[in-house]
Image: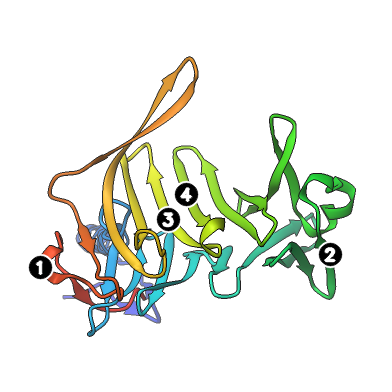
């Protein structure tokens, strides 16, 4: 009796009806296994890892990956590597793809927050922006970014990374500039918030998906914003009103909820969810 053989990762086509059926079932089984492995990680069922000292190490929902170290937010990136943000260096890195019938080129662009300005970087070219209100589109277009406005006032920079549109909201305070990072791609929404009155420390991070009616929120220690304080899931819903859209967030029963000490270590007795020692790989 002959069997369906697998050589170098490829399936050899069978030579009988019985074996053909087995071949189809095998293909379906392999597909199902792949689907289950991929489908295990999602916004509703993310991978949340801690280290052996009870510090949060990483969060991975299959699309977005956040890494932490000793209670400090370290990095945010997409699983396809099209967008990366380093909190330590305050640097956004994204890739812009240009293609035509004959070639494809990929440019790497960086947006860097400095104490009182923003630096755009593409290859060996750089451009420093010292006034948000007076940015000219012609000046920044070579860096694959544009401005966006609220009530006819320039509020920050916008750009595309792998067809996803991100916004960098900038507040030019006297002591130091503050920025917030947003992704608004319905039904998905993402926000990374800073606090300019607390030395521009990270305040909170939120990810939600209206189609799943689910979201994730990370917040830092009250007042100081120096360490991670809470990681939780919530029910997300957008309510449409005459005065605009209102986002409502409610807690979900039987979901994960982790609370951390002032030093950033997990309070194991206050964890609604099983802490796992792992890495998001």
Between 72 and 239, which is closer to the camera in this rendering? 72
| Residue picked out by circle 4 | 190
Describe the element under mark 3 as helix, strand or loop.
strand
Spatial CA span between label 2 and label 4: 27 Å
Disc 3 vs disc 4: which is toward the camera? 3
| Residue picked out by circle 1 | 269
| Residue 72 in the figure: left or right of residue 36 | right
Percent position of residue 80, x then y: 51, 64
| Residue picked out by circle 2 | 127
Q: Are marks 3 and 4 in contact (CB under 8 Å)?
A: no
Mark 3 or mark 2: which comes first in sequence? Answer: 2
Residue 22 seen: no
Spatial CA span between label 1 and label 3: 24 Å
Mark 1 or mark 2: which comes first in sequence? Answer: 2
Q: Is residue 213 above or below residue 255?
A: above
Q: Are marks 2 and 4 in contact (CB under 8 Å)?
A: no
Q: So how many labels did they put on this image?
A: 4
Q: Is residue 71 above or below residue 229?
A: below
Q: Are marks 1 and 3 in contact (CB under 8 Å)?
A: no
Q: Quadrant of residue 142?
A: bottom right
Residue at point 55%, 62% (across, down): 200
Q: Is residue 151 above or below residue 160?
A: above
């Amino acid at each position: 009796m002959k069997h369906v053989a697998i050589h170098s990762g490829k399936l050899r086509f069978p030579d009988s009806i019985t074996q053909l059926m087995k071949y189809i079932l095998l293909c379906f089984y392999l597909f199902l296994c792949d689907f289950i492995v991929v489908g295990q990680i999602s916004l509703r069922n993310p991978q949340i890892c801690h280290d052996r000292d009870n510090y949060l190490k990483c969060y991975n929902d299959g699309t977005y990956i956040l890494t932490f170290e000793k209670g400090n937010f370290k990095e945010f990136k997409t699983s396809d590597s099209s967008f990366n943000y380093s909190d330590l260096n305050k640097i956004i890195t994204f890739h812009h793809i240009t293609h035509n019938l004959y070639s494809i080129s990929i440019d790497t662009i960086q947006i860097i927050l400095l104490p009182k300005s923003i630096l755009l970087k593409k290859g060996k070219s750089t451009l420093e922006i010292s006034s948000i209100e007076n940015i000219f589109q012609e000046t920044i277009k070579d860096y694959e970014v544009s401005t966006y406005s609220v009530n006819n006032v320039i509020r920050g920079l916008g750009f595309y990374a792998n067809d996803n549109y991100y916004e960098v909201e900038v507040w030019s305070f006297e002591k130091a500039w503050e920025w917030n990072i947003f992704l608004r791609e319905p039904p998905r929404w993402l926000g990374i918030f800073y606090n300019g009155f607390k030395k521009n420390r990270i305040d909170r991070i939120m990810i939600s998906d209206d189609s799943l009616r689910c979201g994730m929120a990370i917040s830092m220690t009250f007042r100081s914003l120096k360490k991670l304080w809470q990681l939780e899931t919530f029910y997300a819903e957008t309510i449409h009103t005459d005065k605009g859209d209102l986002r409502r967030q409610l807690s979900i029963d039987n979901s994960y909820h982790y609370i951390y000490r002032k030093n950033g270590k997990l309070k194991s007795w206050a964890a609604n969810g099983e802490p796992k020692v792992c890495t998001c790989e």
